[in-house]
Image: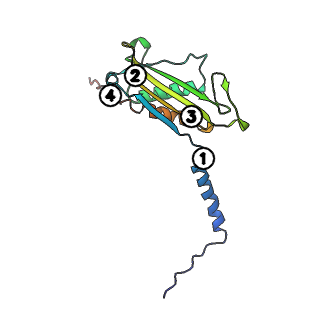
Amino acid sequence: MRHLPHLALPHLALPHLALPLLALTLLACGPAHEVVVSHPIPPGPQLAQMKSYHLVVTPVDEADRTHWMVERAIHDDLRSKGYVPVDRASADVLVQYETDIRGGGDINHGSAINGSVGGRAAAEKHIAVTITDPRSSTMVFRATAQGEVHPGYLTASVNDALDDILAPIPYRAPAPQRVD
């Protein structure tokens, strides 16, 4: 009968392994930013014809960091899909959004600031995006996201939620390039 050689581990190997394993475990169990997204009005056939949009923005004197984040994310998503931002009168569709983020110490919406011990509590988030045909005033798309978000993950969470909200909006085929 043959014996396998004994594994020789230095006596400190287990403590050295324990710290990285503990760190990985804590990262995996870190604060969640799970957000539920729903599309009560999926993209209508009008969106297939859409080439341009106008984003109805929050007036500068009322806007905060969250508004700017949402507006930038919507513009980035729609531009990356081939849509062109234009003035309201020329737009194929109007894009509007609502956002409400409450709680979380350094997070605010309007004048509502709800801190906690240490100022790092989770925040409740609600974002909705509505796309309307301006000629008929018909809503052609609406999606919402809501959930609890840890303040340290606010930017990533808002961007992820908007990616999910706008995912059903189709990519436009690029316009044919004119060759002279």
Q: Nearer the viewer, mark 3 or mark 2?
A: 3
Task: Give the alpha-carbon distance from disc 4 to disc 2, as whole Å.
Answer: 11 Å
Q: Residue furthest left?
A: 180
Q: Residue at the location (64% across, 27% down)?
A: 108
Which numbered disc flags the more N-terminal residue, 1 or 4? Answer: 1
**Category of crowding for the residue at label 2, using alpha-carbon neighbours closer than 10 angstroms: few (below 14), some (14–19), many (at least 20):** some
Which numbered disc flags the more N-terminal residue, 4 or 3? Answer: 3
Compare residues 123 and 95 and report the one nearer the observer. 123
Task: Give the alpha-carbon distance from disc 3 to disc 2, as whole Å.
Answer: 25 Å
Q: Nearer the viewer, mark 3 or mark 1?
A: 1
Compare residues 136 and 13 and report the one nearer the observer. 136
Task: Give the alpha-carbon distance from disc 3 to disc 1, as whole Å.
Answer: 16 Å
Classify the position of the C terminus by image quarter.
Answer: top left
Residue at the disc numbered 4: 174
**Callout 2 amino acid:** Val
Q: Circles 3 and 2: CB distance less than 8 Å?
A: no
SS assignment at label 3: helix
Q: Circles 3 and 1: CB distance less than 8 Å?
A: no
The numbered disc on residue 84 is: 2
**Callout 3 amino acid:** Thr
Residue at the disc numbered 1: 30
Q: Nearer the viewer, mark 2 or mark 1?
A: 1
The numbered disc on residue 59 is: none
Res. 134 image quadrant? top left
Task: Give the alpha-carbon distance from disc 4 to disc 3, as whole Å.
Answer: 30 Å
Res. 107 image quadrant? top right
